[in-house]
Amino acid sequence: MIKKELHTFLTAVMFYTRIPCPKWVDHSADQLNRATRYFPLVGWIVGAVTAAVYLGASYAVPSNIAILFSMIAGILLTGAFHEDGFADVCDGFGGGWTKEKILSIMKDSVLGAYGVIGITLLLLLKYLALVEITTQRDTLDIVFALWLGHSLSRTTSVWVIYTGQYVRENEDAKAKPIAKQMGLGSFVTANILGILPLVFFWKIEILAIMISVTFVKMYFSRYFNKWIGGYTGDCLGAVQQVAEVVIYLSLIALWKYI
């Protein structure tokens, strides 16, 4: 049982990060579907690495530069997996007016103006939000913010998987490997792992963040369903990125009044 769960967890690590995994780790579609339960736990790993890089760099350089190093570490660790999805969504929904056109643009490996502008503004907003947190709060708070941001944002994508419908009928070289379904047990496990960081923060008002990420999920699910009838791997990446930024902004707003 333990070996089976370890296999499932390592499958999640293999698909969602660049961390080397043993050769015996299965990469089948069924195994990936089971591995979705550990998607938020992968966020723990990314959050821990980005926090460690920030803490280490802050001893040598100003905190704003340390934040930039932290973001770079996160992107290298995941291979810009989710950032690429966000950029593709900007291109697809920005330039397409039918389901077929939107899906075709998102599949194209060439990044367009919408994608470049979108990802640039998103990363800038993420950077400024994290710098603001380091300016106003102590070191423990930025560690908590990174932990929560990376775990809960991935949980938001899990909500989309559980309630939505995958829309690409044909796989191709550009299509990202992606979980397309999950059972109730996996869904509950993913939520526990994703929401757990909130338990370690004593102020109950912080639960208001759940309202923010729920709004992100509801808005994008409705938007994607309207235009393409479901979600793709790029859509999940976009939801994760937007949810992460919303979490940081929500923390800033909450900490301003509590």
Image (cartoon, rainbow, N blue to C red):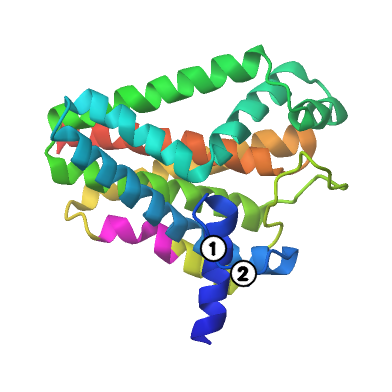
Q: Which amino acid does label 2 sit on?
A: Val
The disc at residue 21 is: 1
Q: Which residue is drawn at 22% across and 59% down?
A: 200
Helix, strand or loop at label 2? It is loop
Residue 23 location (% of width, % of height):
62, 67
Q: Residue at x 59, y 64 (%)?
A: 11
- Classify 190 as above or below 72: below
Residue 67 location (% of width, % of height):
28, 30
- Classify 111 as above or below 136: above
Q: Quadrant of residue 244?
A: top left
For the magenta stretch, what is the residue range?
192-199
Residue 212 location (% of width, % of height):
41, 40
Determine if the magenta segment contains residue 82: no
**As rendered, which of 167 and 17 lies closer to the eye?**
17
Q: Is the magenta stretch mostly helix, strand or loop?
A: helix
Q: Quadrant of residue 250?
A: top left
Residue at numbered disc 2: 25
Dot 2: few (<14), some (14–19), or many (≥20) neighbours within 10 Å? some
Helix, strand or loop at label 1? It is loop
**Left/right of residue 226 with respect to residue 254 in the rendered view:** right
Determine if the magenta segment contains residue 194: yes
Question: Farthest residue in the bottom direction?
Answer: 1
Quadrant in which the C terminus appears:
top left
Dot 1: few (<14), some (14–19), or many (≥20) neighbours within 10 Å? some
- Marks 1/2 in contact by CB < 8 Å: the verdict is yes
